[in-house]
């Protein structure tokens, strides 16, 4: 029976336990625990808004995801991505997107980071023009991370956000001038299993978008100058997905009386099929568009995924697949040309280097790489770029200030000189494969999955930022090499990769990780579980679509119905797990090392 009123208790950090209640629309069940403040996100009105989006768009989301499968089956059968001949009128037409609001005309440096409270404050204060608050690549979407993320964003929009570091006796609060907030919801493929609508888990991105928009749209009208809110949209593969987002925006604006076109969104071009659809994507979103961004890490991941059935397209070591590769350079140039032709921003991407505190020489070398990457972007014609860490903002700002005198280059760098063909966009990357590459992928993959299972979606590993997108490259590259018996041609004696070699690498790298993190941390952590999961994915007969689908199944924490009426903060026995988790657990039992 569906409840339309549920009574429950939740924790209040300051006042101990207090009684509270959720008023749920018909057909809605909250399956995650309730902690302090969640009831102010899960209001009946907000849930009604999210439920309407879910019911309206659910079947289109399923259809889109089915289409992705069909398209992949064609690629697996030998097809390669190409421009769609049926869309030539859109590609060649002279239309432009609606204008860019003043508030985001200058986006030269954007900091990104998960929606964690202290990081939100630090990012907004960092001196960057924009902060992209992330529910995606850099967030492990555990229920508490997601709920707290919404609380943090609401407090950030209202400028009341504070955080006290008791150990350091430091109070974090916002500066007078802060970055403009963008929010990146999850990709279409991820569910929010803790919210059930009509007996099905909700679509993750519709809940991320829905709660943020519902709770904050008014502030954008009153205190933020009328424009916004602003979004980043990840991992799309086709313009039909952009069309669904556009309909979501239309419906949301209409439902809450927000002027049409107030929402603006930048689409990440971070899948190989999407690069052939850039005009079409902008066209679908033309009244809501704030340009495109080069999501380089997922793009590399997508190159492998798209060509998973093509043994002649094995990647060299991950470290060699940089922006200098012809296919990467071609993609960025075509993106700049496309965006500027349509009157919107062409944003650059993320250099993986972060400040290195304990080694000045290594730090200077890392900063030189970031500087070179940003110089390449601004001289190519990008209007702005991403930075992963507050310690990079002034460096990146300096590069853009020295090379971009106006607020953007939309009018000044049309890049009409660029002529990119289909062949340029899929040219095979060059380089060599090494055992060290296989080892590094494995070490990074295991540690990243371990962090993710524990609730952290972006981590520093070997002085680089690692998040879901970069970890995906490690996973699919290993899979590709094992699947096709890649020859490690960068070794003095070429070695063929097979499951036996990989099993040895996994156990040796796991031992190395234990040495690096220390036995105590290793024992307390989930490294063995992470290694098993990563190994299963790397050796699967069919490539898993996303690393995080498997991982999410292991972090869904469903509160049994009978216990929803009591405070419950612990973990739950196996029989309480969502059916999704039980399936994965069974699969894991079969992994052979
Ligand atoms: C492929 C993509 O999608 S890229 C976009 C998604 N990825 C990201 O956004 C990654 C964001 N960056 C990060 O998460 C972090 O910088 C990491 C994990 C890479 C490194 O984190 P750490 O090693 O903890 O950083 P470090 O210890 O140097 O942090 C120093 C300070 O900067 C803060 N900080 C670091 N990165 C960020 C950030 N991106 N936003 C806000 N604050 C940050 C830390 O909170 C810390 O604050 P404090 O001094 O007040 O305590
Ligand atoms: O989201 C960005 C990426 O590079 O992936
Ligand atoms: Mg990405």
Image (tube, rainbow, N blue to C red):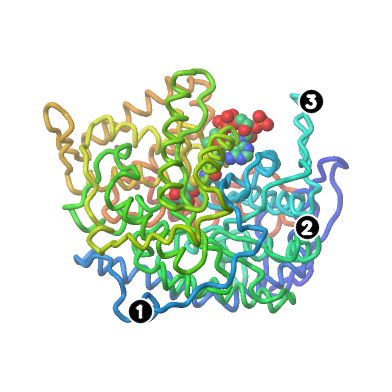
Disc 1 secondary structure class: helix
Q: Which mark is residue 87?
A: 1
- Few, some or many C-alpha atoms within 10 Å of disc 3 (few <14, some 14-19, many ≥20)? few
Residue 449's place in the image compared with 545, above or below, is above
Q: Nearer the viewer, mark 1 or mark 2?
A: 1
Gap in angstroms between the C-alphas marked 1 and 2? 46 Å
Sequence-wise, which precedes: disc 3 or disc 1? 1
What's the residue at 62%, 50% (across, down)?
130
What's the residue at 84%, 45% (across, down)?
17
Residue 173 is situated, as x and y percent measured from the top left of the image, at 78, 39
In the rendered structure, the answer to whether residue 196 lies left or right of residue 121 reads: left
Sequence-wise, which precedes: disc 1 or disc 2? 2
Residue 397's place in the image compared with 76, above or below, is above
Residue at which label 3 appears: 169
Q: Quadrant of the C terminus?
A: top left
Residue 35 is situated, as x and y percent measured from the top left of the image, at 75, 49
Question: Which residue reaches farthest left?
Answer: 493
Q: Which mark is residue 39?
A: 2
Disc 2 secondary structure class: helix
What's the residue at 78%, 41% (across, down)?
162
Gap in angstroms between the C-alphas marked 3 and 2? 29 Å
Residue 150's place in the image compared with 112, above or below, is below
Label 1 CB, ligand 3: below 8 Å? no
Q: Residue 36 carries which label?
A: none
From this viewpoint, is residue 454 visible?
A: no
**Image marks 3 and 2: residues in contact by CB distance under 8 Å:** no
Residue 55 is situated, as x and y percent measured from the top left of the image, at 60, 77
Q: Nearer the viewer, mark 3 or mark 2?
A: 3
Disc 3 secondary structure class: loop
Count of numbered circles on the image: 3
């Amino acid at each position: 029976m569906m409840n339309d009123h549920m009574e429950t208790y939740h924790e209040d950090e300051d006042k101990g336990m207090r009684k509270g209640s959720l008023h749920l629309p018909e057909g809605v069940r909250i399956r995650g625990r309730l902690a302090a403040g969640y009831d102010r996100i899960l209001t009946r009105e907000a849930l009604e808004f999210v439920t309407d989006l879910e019911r309206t768009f659910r079947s289109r989301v399923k259809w889109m995801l089915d289409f992705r499968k069909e398209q992949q089956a064609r690629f697996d059968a030998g097809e390669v991505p190409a421009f769609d001949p049926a869309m030539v009128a859109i590609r060649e037409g002279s239309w432009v997107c609606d204008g860019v609001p003043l508030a985001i005309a200058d986006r030269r440096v954007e900091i990104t980071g998960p929606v964690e409270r202290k990081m939100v404050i630090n990012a907004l204060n960092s001196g960057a023009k924009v902060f992209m608050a992330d529910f995606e690549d850099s967030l492990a979407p555990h229920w508490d991370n997601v709920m707290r993320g919404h609380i943090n964003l609401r407090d950030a929009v209202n400028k009341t956000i504070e955080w006290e570091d008791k150990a350091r006796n430091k109070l974090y609060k916002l500066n007078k001038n802060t970055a403009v907030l963008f929010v990146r919801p999850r990709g279409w493929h991820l569910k929010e299993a803790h919210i059930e609508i009509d007996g099905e888990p909700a679509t993750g991105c519709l809940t991320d978008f829905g709660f943020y928009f519902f709770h904050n749209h008014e502030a954008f009208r009153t205190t933020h100058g009328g424009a916004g809110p602003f979004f980043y949209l990840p991992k799309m593969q086709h313009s039909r997905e952009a069309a669904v987002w556009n309909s979501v925006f239309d419906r949301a604006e209409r439902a809450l009386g927000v002027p049409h076109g107030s929402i603006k969104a930048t689409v990440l071009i971070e899948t190989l099929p999407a690069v052939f659809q850039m005009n079409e994507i902008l066209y679908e979103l033309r009244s809501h568009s704030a340009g495109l961004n080069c999501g380089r890490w997922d793009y590399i991941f997508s190159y492998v995924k798209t060509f998973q059935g093509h043994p002649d397209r094995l990647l060299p070591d991950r470290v060699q697949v940089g922006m200098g590769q012809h296919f990467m350079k071609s993609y960025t140039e075509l993106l700049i040309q496309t965006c500027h032709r349509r009157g919107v921003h062409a944003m650059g991407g993320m250099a993986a280097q972060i400040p290195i505190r304990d080694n000045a020489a290594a730090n200077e070398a890392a900063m030189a790489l970031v500087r070179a990457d940003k110089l390449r972007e601004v001289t190519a014609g990008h209007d702005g770029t991403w930075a992963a860490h507050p310690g990079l903002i002034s460096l990146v700002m300096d590069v853009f200030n020295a090379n971009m005198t106006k607020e953007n280059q939309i009018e000044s760098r049309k890049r009409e000189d660029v002529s990119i063909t289909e062949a340029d966009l899929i040219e095979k990357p060059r380089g060599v494969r090494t055992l060290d590459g296989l080892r590094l992928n494995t070490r990074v993959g295991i540690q990243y999955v371990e962090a993710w299972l524990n609730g952290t979606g972006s981590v520093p590993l070997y002085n680089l930022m690692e998040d879901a997108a970069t970890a995906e490259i490690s996973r699919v590259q290993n899979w590709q090499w094992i699947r096709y018996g890649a020859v490690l041609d960068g070794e003095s004696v070429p070695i063929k990769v097979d499951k036996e070699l990989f099993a040895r690498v996994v156990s040796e790298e796991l031992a190395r990780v234990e040495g690096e993190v220390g036995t105590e941390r290793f024992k307390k952590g989930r490294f063995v579980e992470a290694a098993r999961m990563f190994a299963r994915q790397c050796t699967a007969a069919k490539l898993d679509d996303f690393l995080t689908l498997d991982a999410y199944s292991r972090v869904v924490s469903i509160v049994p119905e009978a216990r929803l009426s009591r405070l419950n903060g612990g973990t739950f026995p196996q029989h309480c797990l969502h059916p999704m988790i039980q399936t994965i657990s069974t699969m894991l039992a079969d992994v052979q090392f």
